[in-house]
Image (spheres, rainbow, N blue to C red):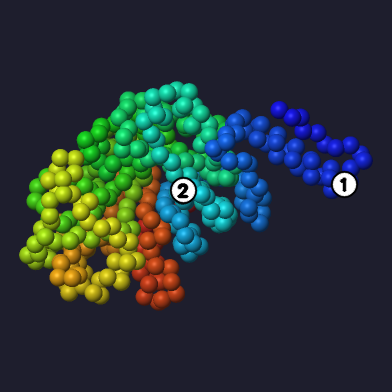
Amino acid sequence: MKQLTVSDGSSSPAERMRWSLVLVQFLAVLALGIRPSSGAGSLTRCPCPSLNLCQPLPADHQYQVEAVVFDNGGSAWMYYDWSKVTTIVTTQPVNPSLLCQAHEHSVRLVLKEKIRQTHLKNKKDQDIWIRDMAYFVSTQFMDGIYLELSHLVTNFKALPKLLMAIKEIFHHKLPGSQVSISVPWSPDCPDGKCYDYTSMAQSCDFLYVKAYDMQLEMWDECFAKANAPYDQTFSGLSHYIQLGVNPKKLILGLPWYGNDFPCQHFYEPGRCKLSKYVFNGAPCSSQIAKRIAYKDIMQLIPRSFTGRYWDDNYKSPYFVYMDKDVYHEVWYDDPQSLSLKSSIVKKLKLGGIGVQFGNNLNYSANPTAAMQTEDMWNALCPTRLKWRT
């Protein structure tokens, strides 16, 4: 490794200043104790107008209730209601302007990554992967990592140990960083895979409970159904707590999208029979439906011949429209259904709430769209309490 030195007195003051800055930057990387990697990228300069905005949020910067918003690209983040957000989850490449905006509002920016089978089998590969992730997050001035499992992962018993290793590295090298992982809406093996959720919760900061896509496996009648029924949402979270998971470690994840089901036979609103679609052995699945963002749903409702219907059993809205002689039934969540589910956070004393995706709302200047968008943000906090302590 070449030794970095400040040039001699024959150089100009500007040259000496430049080398001084290089030396400080180099020593900062050594202080982190994270090795660089060809796949992780190099240390970047602060992209924000103030260097303070490139400081990760400190460890003592905590919230009474977490509000996690997933961002999937674009520029919609400029119009988010930042008063209700505590964490933004994003993917690579990381938008520098999003980082600056998040830190300006004391909001953590967290990287989304996927755990693969190889990360659970080979200890050497695992260590390299963890340090590469920590290095990348540090060079992007971010505040942690959100993990999802690849569908090919089968080494369930090794998962808590991996999570603990990730948390120890991140918390040691990046104080104040956040480590979380997504889990199904219920701990009762809804996808046929069972994990030690209690140990997983102890090994990271949060379990993000994906309380949506609950109809992936339909074992009874093949009819269109709600994406995130209230009773199933409540029971799934309750089962996690009954297993011994600390409720403060649970984040309730909700959808800002719906499912557009094509009907094989349409009998009446709420009775949309689906074609068979085998999934995990079940004869029918919501995968036959098209996922549709809330902003598009709002433009589609005026085309429906039913208007908005409400189902008391699922506590969810839906409507029916026709396209090329085919009936479609759309089940979705709106401010009424989301407010009911967000109240579960207080009832079960959960760690927080989250939504996928912040981009799914209409941030145009249209007055009707603006009101619809404001109502959706307000549904995250129906009692209008402040999120922060």
Number of on-image labels: 2
Image quadrant in which the N terminus is located: top right
Q: Mark number for residue 13?
A: 1
Give the side of residue 76 with respect to residue 260, left or right: right
Q: Is residue 105 left or right of residue 302?
A: right
- Tell me which label, 1 or 2, sits earlier in the chain: 1
The reply to whether callout 1 and callout 2 are in contact (CB within 8 Å) is no
View extreme (top): residue: 123
**Residue at x 66% of width, y 47% of height:** 45
Name the residue furthest right: 10
Dot 1: element = helix
Q: Is residue 7 visible?
A: yes
Q: Amino acid at mark 2?
A: Thr
Assess disc 2: are there few (<14), some (14-19) or many (≥20) residues with their C-alpha within 10 Å of its C-alpha.
Answer: some
The image quarter in which residue 21 lies: top right
Mark 2, residue position: 91
Residue at 54% from the left image edge and 45% from the top image edge:
142
Horizontal side of residue 313 vs 10, given as left or right: left
On the image, the x and y values in percent for residue 282 come to 14, 43
Task: Name the residue rendered at 9%, 47% in the picture.
Answer: 220
Name the residue nearer the viewer: 322 or 224. 322
Q: Quadrant of residue 197?
A: top left
Coordinates of residue 381 in the picture (x, y in percent): 38, 58
